[in-house]
Amino acid sequence: MAFSFIALSLTGSTSGGAAMILAMTLAQIAGAVPLARLGRNLPAATTFRLLISFRAMALASITVCAAYGASFEWLVLFAAAAGLVNGAAYGFLRTLLNHFVLASRLPRALGIASTLNEVTFVLAPVAASGLATVSPLLALLAMTTLGALPAIVVPWTAAVARVEGLPTLHGKLLSPEVLLWFACAAASGATVASIEIGAVALALNFGYEPALAITFTVPLCLASVAGGIWISVRNRMASRTAVVVQLAAMALGSALAAVNHSMVMTVVGTVLIGVVLAPLGTYFSLALDTLAPPERRPELFALLRTSQAGGVVCASALLTFVSLSSALVWVTALMTAVTLAVALAPTRLNIQNRA
């Protein structure tokens, strides 16, 4: 939202904001694994602070360039620089959680994190819009300042983050089990993005004004918040059967949107997608916790974030090059495929649920 406003003020078009986001996302995909590997020999908190500080400088550079009317290409370049560290920073932040939270409380902690993430997703665009009405630079400055805060408030630890009480499978990092959960993360990311990015097109498709795109995005976010609260209260890792049901619910929600029958059916579909988003994200994270050596967890979590970003890129590309209905059909097919893969995959790892 902030990027779109600054692009509009500098170029007269919001398409520049989309270009900045695309550059940021592609850079995140490219930098996730290399930066996660480079930081393995440092304490996780130190590496996280360095990455966030780099991002803050890149965002500050965008603000300065916008303030002095620099060529828009510089803004895109610095947006890519800011995105370069996002995947690795998430990997180290998620790894730090293992050090500060007992394994028995990880589902609750991840559920709370997911809930806060969705609340932020709802409120941040509203705040950006409000600040941008005063000045687009003010919205950028707020994003830069808030984006730097994690480097200050993250707890310090010199230890390697580990999870006690969960089994660890040793061997190659990209095992079939790991790749399966990456595929699920990518599919769920594509499913959510197809609704969020296609919300305006959905509203127009049913004959409503573009502003009523919130009819789809708000129920999606509220359902996701509810799912996060449920995970936090339950504080248990789901069974494989429950995960298959949740994946099937997301596939069904995408199918309801793809059918294009009515506004009500589409909203029901978005609610189905949203309500299982946090439970699935929590399960993917906890499952991957058990599938990599502790020293490679930052890399694994960075790849998880990258998989989700890859799903967003795929959904964006589909919505760009094919019709909305075709894009939703393809996303539904992808979601159905990963659901069947999880249902039919042999369970080689037996993880006991912990209260």
Image (spheres, rainbow, N blue to C red):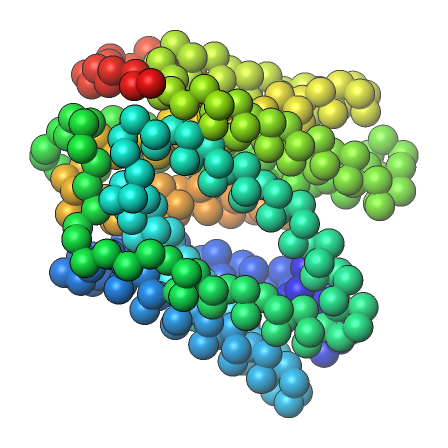
Is 286 positioned to the left or the right of 129 in the image? left
Residue positioned 42% across, 35% down in the render = 110
Q: Residue 68: x and y, percent? A: 64, 89
Residue 353 in picture, x, y percent from top left:
30, 16
Question: At which x and y percent is residue 14?
Answer: 72, 64
Q: Which of 148 and 339 is in front in this view?
A: 148
Q: Is residue 281 visible?
A: no
Q: Is residue 131 shown to the viewer in this render?
A: yes
Looking at the image, how many numbered discs can be counted on the residues?
Answer: 0
The residue at 58%/66% (across/down) is: 143
Q: Quadrant of the C terminus?
A: top left
In the image, is residue 10 above or below residue 129? below
Residue 65 falls in image quadrant:
bottom right
Q: Does 221 appear above or below 355?
A: below
Quadrant placement of the N terminus: bottom right
Left or right of residue 105, residue 209 in this image: right
Residue 71 in percent (x, y) is at 61, 84
- Horizontal side, residue 28 vs residue 329: left or right: left
